[in-house]
Image: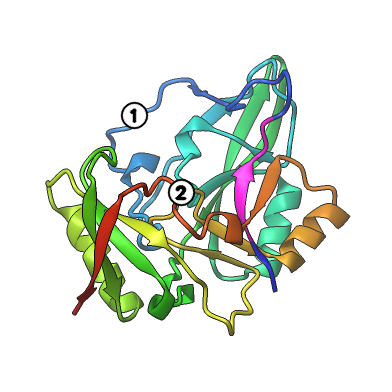
Amino acid sequence: MEYFLLKPKVLRNRKYPQSESWIGRYDYESENSIQKINHFKPIDFEIEVPDFELHEKSEWTDNVSCIQFMGFSTLMVSQKLAELLEELSPDKWQFYNLNLTKKSESRVYKMAYLSRVQNEMIDFSKSTFFYAEGSYENTSVSLVKFSNSSEYNRELLRITNSKANKRLHYHEISLVNDRTEDVFRLYNLVNNIVVSENFKSECEKRNISGFEMVSFDTVAQNYHFKFDQYQVENIS
């Protein structure tokens, strides 16, 4: 089965992202802010989701690109798309109502948060990673391998919680062969919501708008990785 990465669709002669500002006052530093989401786990606090403005040069779509939700564990979705997400991947999503307004028209949308990270969908025997600070300007680097998702998740948490300006990037990612999920999320991958052929087909049948779906195979190799020399080390 082929898998795809979800990307917001960029429409010709239309504003992107479609929404850049919220309506009214919103305290991003409050304990209930969307900024307080820990993207490794479900939302476990009384979150307050702001209402947003749809840019006047944007169209109404089922998925709305929003600058505050560009981390791709969260989406701004219509009720129709929310129903599809819940149908194909039950018990993974948390939904919160918000109002989306364009000029004098207001519609109820939802912030959809994919609460489970499923790095176990990575085939670690065929995947490699590397550490880098800032841009990729080195001429040599060590690639690292992890034996399983537990090791990988621990290292991601350690780096996230540290103050060092260092990130763990992927060099090449393969998915496990025995996958049956229609929607899942990989942490530390650009546009990290992955969907199946079945999800793509259902979107087409139901005329779900606002997405592009890019074959996972086209991004499995990190084409920003331009080092001339490297060696592989195992993390244990």
Residue highlighted by disc 2: 223
Vertically, is 122 above or below 223?
below
- Where residue 230 sits in the image (x, y, percent)? 26, 60
Q: Amino acid at mark 2?
A: Tyr
Q: Residues within 10 Å of mark 1 (few under 14, many from 20)?
A: few
Image-based side of 135 in relation to 19, left or right = left
What element does badge 1 sit on?
loop
Which of the numbered marks, if any, corresponds to residue 103?
A: none
Q: Amino acid at mark 1?
A: Asp
Displayed quadrant of residue 42 = bottom left
Which of the numbered marks, if any, corresponds to residue 27?
A: 1
- Where residue 235 sits in the image (x, y, percent)? 20, 75
Of residues 181 and 36, the one nearer the viewer is 181
Q: Residue at x 43, y 63 (%)?
A: 172
Colour mode of the rendering: rainbow
Displayed quadrant of residue 126 = bottom left
